[in-house]
Image (cartoon, rainbow, N blue to C red):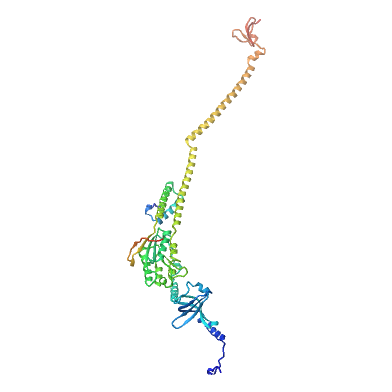
């Protein structure tokens, strides 16, 4: 007979599937195992053609099979390597076909990052509550950064990149480098001292705080509380340019502006010299244009006045008078001629009339003028004539003597 | 408007010269000055623009480095660069 019942209870006989399913349900319904971070050492990494990632996480006492499906595995910056210390996130379940419990992983990270990340979140929350990251605290960047302060490693690529950009865009600037380590234990103190020294000695118009990208451990100094406070306390506005595109450090939040890379930080603060040059030319052109306009306007005004002056000048007046005089002269002449002509006609008429009524006409008609001889006067009456009086008879064509009978 | 003594362009920084040039152009455009003053403004503007040009042409990024331990002062550093 098969079983010996313990405590008198009869144990049912389960199939393998049943048992396995039970175990699976047990795990699936334990909420603590459905969202779990596990740390361990990686081994047995396998990535078959399917693209799925299989590996084992182990420590001194135990081992855990892990599988990460292809979509999640593809998102990893780098696949885990044998011997690497990692933290893996996922849920625990059973692969029934092989009776294997395993961790179905969705993401993993280098070990230790988890702790640092926690610290980062806590510090961020605390400083944010203090108002250190408030938008109102952010200062505008100067339009004309004649003096630029630079806080970075003297041997890093960030320095070279920043100088390259500044030389291209804004060679008019004066750059002061405050060299400091940007990672490691001495970094936080070095960054703080650099910021303070620049503000105290150089009084720059803006400060660039830059370094290349790195892991969360590499960037630890930029998540340091003291550094964040030094940034906030900086008299000059601070532009933070740490070379990682996506994540933010505490320094990014504390700074007045955040740039995704050191080069971008340099670009943000500097005006572009080609634009400056164009602007200069524009103003020179406006200057010349404005003056040209002015002169043209003045010249027109002058010409107008000249014209009007000419019209009313003494010479003009004389010429005008002369003209009028000539006009009058002509008219006078005309008038005189006409007058004379008219008079002539009138005189002619009178003469005609005179002739008609003059003695000659009378004589023509046959009358004679009898007068006493030797100017004795015209005889008008018979009384003046006696027989023998000597007379002169004048007729139309002459006179002859006569004696009265 | 009181007449301020104008600095010689050679003494002006780019920013100063450019600002004055801006103001000069605006002043001239406002157009309410006598001809002699307008001509004087124009001449000044030309000098300022020339100064700015000169600075832009000859500009070379100046780099200096703080002495360590913040003991005060900075020393100039040559830019040794491979671009």
Report x, y in % for residue A333.
Answer: 55, 27
- Asked whether residue B53 is in view, the answer is yes
Between A20 and A242, the one nearer to me in the picture: A20
Residue B47 point in image, percent of width and height: 40, 50
Q: Nearer the viewer, residue B24 or A52?
A: A52
Residue A298 against residue A199 in the figure, above or below:
above
- Residue A396 drawn above or below residue A123: above
Q: Is residue B63 left or right of residue A308?
A: left
**Residue B7 in view in this figure:** no
- Quadrant for residue A390, please give it: top right
Closer to us: A214 or A80: A80
Q: Is residue A189 left or right of residue A104?
A: left
**Residue found 65% across the figure and 15% down from its top:** A361
> Which quadrant of the figure contains the N terminus of chain A?
bottom right
Q: Residue furthest left?
A: B71
Look at the image and tell me in which quarter the C terminus of chain A lies.
top right
- Whole-percent x, y for residue A240 in the image: 43, 66
Which residue extends farthest right? A366
- Taking depth in this image into account, of A13 and A314 the one nearest to the observer is A13
Residue A229 spot, x, y in % from top left = 40, 70
């Amino acid at each position: 007979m098969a079983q010996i019942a313990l405590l008198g209870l009869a144990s049912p006989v389960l199939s393998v599937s049943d048992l396995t399913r039970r175990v699976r349900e047990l795990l699936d319904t334990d909420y603590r195992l459905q969202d779990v971070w596990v740390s361990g050492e990686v081994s047995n990494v396998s990535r078959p053609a399917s693209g799925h990632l299989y590996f084992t996480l182990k420590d001194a006492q135990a081992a855990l099979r892990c599988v990460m499906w292809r979509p999640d595995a593809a998102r990893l910056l780098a696949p885990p390597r044998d011997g690497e210390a990692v933290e893996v996130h996922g849920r625990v379940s059973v692969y029934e076909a092989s009776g294997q419990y395993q961790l179905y992983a969705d993401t993993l990270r280098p070990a230790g990052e988890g702790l640092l990340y926690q610290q980062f979140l806590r510090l961020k929350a605390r400083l944010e509550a203090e108002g250190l990251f408030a938008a109102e605290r952010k200062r505008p960047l100067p339009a004309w950064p004649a003096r630029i302060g630079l806080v970075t490693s003297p041997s890093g690529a960030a320095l070279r990149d920043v100088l390259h950009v500044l030389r291209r865009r804004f060679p008019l600037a004066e750059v002061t480098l405050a060299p400091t380590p940007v990672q490691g234990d001495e970094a936080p103190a070095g960054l703080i001292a650099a910021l303070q020294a620049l503000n105290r000695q150089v009084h720059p118009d803006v400060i660039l705080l830059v370094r290349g990208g790195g892991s969360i451990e590499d960037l630890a100094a930029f998540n340091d509380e003291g550094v964040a406070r030094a940034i906030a306390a900086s008299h000059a506005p601070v532009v933070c340019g740490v070379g990682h595109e996506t994540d933010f450090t505490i320094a990014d939040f504390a700074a007045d502006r955040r740039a995704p890379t050191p080069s971008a930080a340099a670009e943000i603060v500097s005006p572009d010299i080609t634009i400056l040059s164009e602007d200069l030319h524009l103003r020179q052109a406006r200057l010349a244009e404005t003056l040209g306009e002015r002169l043209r306007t003045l010249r027109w005004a002058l010409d107008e006045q000249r014209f009007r002056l000419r019209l009313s000048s003494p010479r003009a007046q004389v010429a005008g008078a002369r003209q009028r005089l000539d006009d009058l002269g002509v008219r006078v002449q005309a008038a005189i001629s006409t007058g004379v002509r008219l008079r002539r006609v009138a005189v002619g008429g009178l003469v005609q009339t005179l002739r008609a009524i003059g003695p000659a006409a009378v004589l023509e008609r046959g009358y004679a003028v009898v007068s006493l001889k030797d100017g004795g006067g015209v005889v008008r009456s018979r009384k003046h004539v006696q027989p023998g009086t000597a007379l002169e008879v004048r007729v139309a064509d002459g006179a002859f003597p006569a004696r009265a009978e | 408007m009181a007449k301020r003594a104008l600095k010689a362009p050679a003494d002006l920084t780019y920013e100063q010269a450019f600002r004055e040039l801006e103001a000069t152009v605006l002043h001239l455009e406002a157009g309410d000055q006598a001809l002699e003053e307008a001509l004087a403004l124009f001449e000044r503007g030309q000098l300022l623009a020339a100064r700015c040009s000169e600075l832009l042409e000859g500009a070379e990024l100046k780099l200096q480095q703080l002495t360590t331990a913040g003991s005060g002062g900075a020393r100039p550093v040559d830019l040794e660069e491979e671009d």
